[in-house]
Amino acid sequence: MMENITARYNIVYHGRKIIADVTRENFAAHQDNYQQLLPVLIEPTDATESSNTALMDSVIGKALDIINRKSNSKYINEAYLLTGRANYLKGNYYNAVEFFTYVANTFAEMPEYRQAAMIWKARALMQLDNLTEAGLALDTAFLGLESEKKSVGLAFATQAKYYLLTHDEESAITMLEQAIEHTAHKPTKLRWHFLLGQLLQRHDRAEEAYAHYSKVIRSNVPYAMSFHAGLNRVFLATAENADGESRVRLLSRMLRDGKNKEFKDQIHYQIGEVYYADEHVPEALANYELALRQQSNNPYQTSLTYLKLADHYFAAAEYQTAKLYYDSVGMSLPADFPDAGVVQRKIANLDELIAQLRVVAHQDTLQYLAGLSEAQRGAEIDSIIARAYAEVQASKDEVAKKTSQQSARRSPFDDIASPAATYTDNRFYFNNPDAMGMGEAEFRRRWGNRQLRDNWRFSDMVGAASGADTGNTAIALEEAAVLPDTAKVDSATWAANLRDTYLNALPDTEEKLAASHTRIHDALTHIGNSYRDELLDNPAAASTYEELLKRYPGTKDAALMYYNLYRLYTGVDEPKAAYYREKLLDEFPDALYSHIIRDPSYLTKLEQQKQVLDRAYEHVYTLYTERQYPEVVAAVTDVMGKQQGRQQTLSQLAYLRALAWGRTSTLDTFENALRQLVSDFPDDSLITPLASQHLAFIEANRDTLTTRIYALQGIDENRDRFVDEPTMTLWPQLVINRGPERPRPRRELAVSTAGQTGIRGNNNLGRVQGVAQQQLAGVAEVGELGPNVYRDLELLPDSATYYFVINVMNDRVNLAPSRFGIGQFNRTRYPGNTISHQLKGVDGESQLVYIGPFNTYEEAKGYETRILPLLPDIMKIPGDIYNTFVITESNFGTLSDFDKIDDYQTIYLEQR
C-alpha cells in the first residue's frame, strides 16, 4: 500500500504534470506558418528538446525509481509509459520506441496502456522517418480502437499525419474529421479545422473548406489564424466572390482594415495572384512590387513574392531581370520553404541555363529574320534597334539623374568619411579606408555597380516591353554592348553598326542555317540535361526533350531522347512512358537504350563482356609485340567469330590482325584487310580513321610498297617509317624516390621548379611521322617539397608547358595495350604534331601516362575534350582505377606520392 501511495502521489502525479506542462508550453511556443499546411501534431524541435532535457531526465529518474525500487507497485506500467514519453519529448526516439514496444507487449491485457503505447510508438517511428513500421503500429492500434476511448482522438490524428507523410490527402481529411469529433481540447480542434480547410481547398471542395474556415473565424483564435482563414476564404468559389473582380474588392477591404497592417504584404500578393490568374499581368506585377515594399518580418512571404516575379520574368525570356529576382530569393529563402532545394539548385545553375536559353532565343530570332523579305527584315530589325536604343538612353538618363541628385544632397556619411571627422579611431568601420575599400570591392564583385536607390537589387531593371519583343531587345542590348558608347557616337552610326551585326549573323546560306540548327539542338539538349540532372525538375526536362524532338524529329540523339522521356514519365504518366518505350523499341531496336529496356542488367553484362575483350586484347597485343603473328591472326579470328562484345574493341582487334598480316603477307593482303576493317566498322572513331590514313598512304606510295616481300618491314632508323609501324621498345620509366617528409598540418599542393620534373628539357618528345623510339629516362631525385600558396592562374596559367595526364591508381596493371591506343588516337587526331606519351611510376602506387607537350592551357584542354569520350575504348583497364587531369610541367614534378596526386586531381576538378 505504501509503495502504491508514494508511487502515485510522489512520482506518477508529478511526472504526468511535468509532461503535461511541457506539452502545453510546446503548443503555446509553436509558431504556425499559415501559408503552408499546418502540422497535425506539435512535435518536439531542437530548441524544445534542449530546453526540456533536464525536466525529462527528472521524469525518467522518478519512473526508474518505481521500476527498480517499487516492484510491488501497481504503477509499473505507468512508469514505463512515462519513461517512453519523456524520451520522446527529449528527442530520444529510438529509446522511446523500445519503451513503448515493451509497454504494448507486456501490458497487452490493459487497453489503456496498450493503445497509448502503440500510438506513441507510431509517432516516434514517424519522427525517425520509418513510415513502414509506423503504418504497422497504427494498424495494430486501430484493431483495438473500440476497447479504449481516451486515446481515440490521438489515434485518428496520428493516422492523419501518417497519410499526409505518404501523400494520401483524401484519407487524411477523413481521419482529421474523426479526430475533431473525438477531441475535447479546443485550441487543437481549431487548428485541425484550419488544416481541414486547407486540405479541402486544395481538393476543390470549396463549400466544406469555407465552413471550416468560418468556424475558425467565429472562434477565439489568435488573430493571425483568423486573418489567414479569412484570406483563404476569399479564394473559395462562393456567391459572394465568384469572379476575380469580387475577390479583389474583398481583398482591398481587408487592406483598409487597420488590424491587417502587418499583413499587407500578403494581401497585395494575393491581389496580384488574382490579377495574374485573370491574365491582367501589369496589375499583377504592380501588386507583387507593392507586396515587396511593405514592412514585414515574414521571410516566407518575401521569398514567395520574389520567386513569383523571378519565375514570371524567366518565362517571359527577360533573363537579366529574372536573375536579379532569383538572387533576392536566395538572400531571403527560409530553410523550411517548400521545395527549397529545388529553388537553390535553380539559382546555383541559373547562369548556364540562361546562357543556353539565350542561344535558342537568339538563333530563333535570326532564323525568323532570315525568312522575311528584305523590306520586312529591315522593318523588323529597325524595330528591335529602336527599342534597344531607347532602353540604352533611358538607362543613361537615369544614371545621370541619380548622379545629379546624389551630388546635390549631403550624405549623412559625409562627416564620417571626411578626414576632418570628429571620430578618427580607425577601429570604427567607416573610419577605416582599407575596410571600406574591401567592403566596396566585395559588394561590386557580388552585385556589380548598383545605383544608390530604394530596392537597389533591381536598379538596372527595365520594364517597358514584354514577351518575345523584350527577349529580342535584351539580346540586342547584349549585341550593342560591344559597340562604341552612344555618348561618343551618333545614334545613326550606332544603329547602323548594330544592324550590320544582325545582318552578318543571319543564317542566309545552307551552311549557316545548318550551323544555326546545330546550336539550337545542342542548347536544347543542354537545357534538358540541366533540368534533369542539376535542377531535378523532371517536368521541365521532359518538356524540353519533347520540344527538341518536335523541332528535330530526325535527330541522331532520338534514341537517347526517347529513353530519357521513358524514364522521366515512368511512375508519373504511365501512358506516355509506354508511348516512348514503344517508339524506342520500334525505331531503334538495336540501340543501347533498347537493350537496357529489355534487360535491366544489360549494362552489367556489357561491362563483363568488355572486361573479357580487354583481357583478350591484352593477350593478342602481347603476342604481337613478341612477333608471334600467326598466333595473333588465329586468336583474333577466334574472337571475331563469336560476334559478341563492344564494336570498339573488336575494331582494335581487327587492326592488330591486319598489322599481323602486314608483317607476314604482301601488300594486297594487308590492303584488303584494311579495306575490310573500314567496311566492317564504318562508325568507329578511333581505328577506322587510322586505317583510312594507311590506305591513303598506300595509294600515294604504291609503286614503292609493291616491291616489298612483306607489306610491313622491320624497324630501320635510317629510313622513313610507314605511319602504321609502331615502336616496340620498352616503355620509358621515370622513378621518383621520396625524400624525407616534413610534417605538414594539412595536405597541400607543392610546386617545384621545372628542373625537378624529370621530363627532358626540350619539347621534341616524338617524331613528326609517328611515335619515335624512346629511351629509358634517368632517375630524377626529388628533394623536400615545400608548401605553396597559389592562385588559379598560377596553377593553370594561360601559357606554359602542359601535359594531359592519365593517373592509373595501380602500379601492377599492364598499360602497354592502353598506350598503343593512345598512339592510335594521336596519329589520327594530331598528325604531324610533336605529341608523345610517356610513363612515370610514382612511389610504387600509381602510374602516370603523361601526353604532350602543349604550349597553352587551351591546347591541353582541347586535347582533353577530344580524347575523354574515347578513353573507355582506349584504356584496357577498369574505369574506376584511373582518372585524368591537365597539369603544367612545373607542377608535374611534385607528384611524388598518391596523396599529392589525389590532392592535385581534386583541386583541378574544382578549378577547371
Image: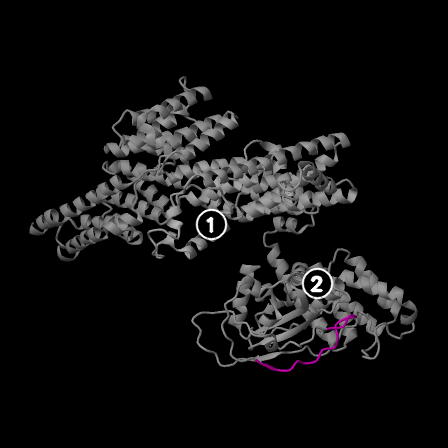
Location of the C terminus by quadrant is bottom right
Q: Which mark is residue 649?
A: 2
Residue 778 shown in magenta? yes
Question: In the image, what residue type sits under mark 1?
Answer: Phe
Residue under label 1: 443
- Tag in front: 1 or 2: 1
Closer to the chain start, of discs 1 and 2, is 1
Q: What is the x, y in percent for residue 585?
A: 67, 45
Residue span colored magenta: 766-781
Q: Marks 1 and 2, how far apart in space?
A: 55 Å
Q: Is residue 532 visible?
A: yes
Looking at the rendered structure, the secondary structure element under dot 2 is helix
Q: Is residue 630 above or below residue 543?
A: below
Residue name at image x 9 percent, y 52 percent? 3
Which residue is outermost to the top? Answer: 239
Q: What is the x, y in percent for residue 172?
A: 37, 35
Residues at circles 1 and 2 in contact by the CB criterion of under 8 Å: no
Q: Is residue 582 visible?
A: no
Q: Which mark is residue 383?
A: none
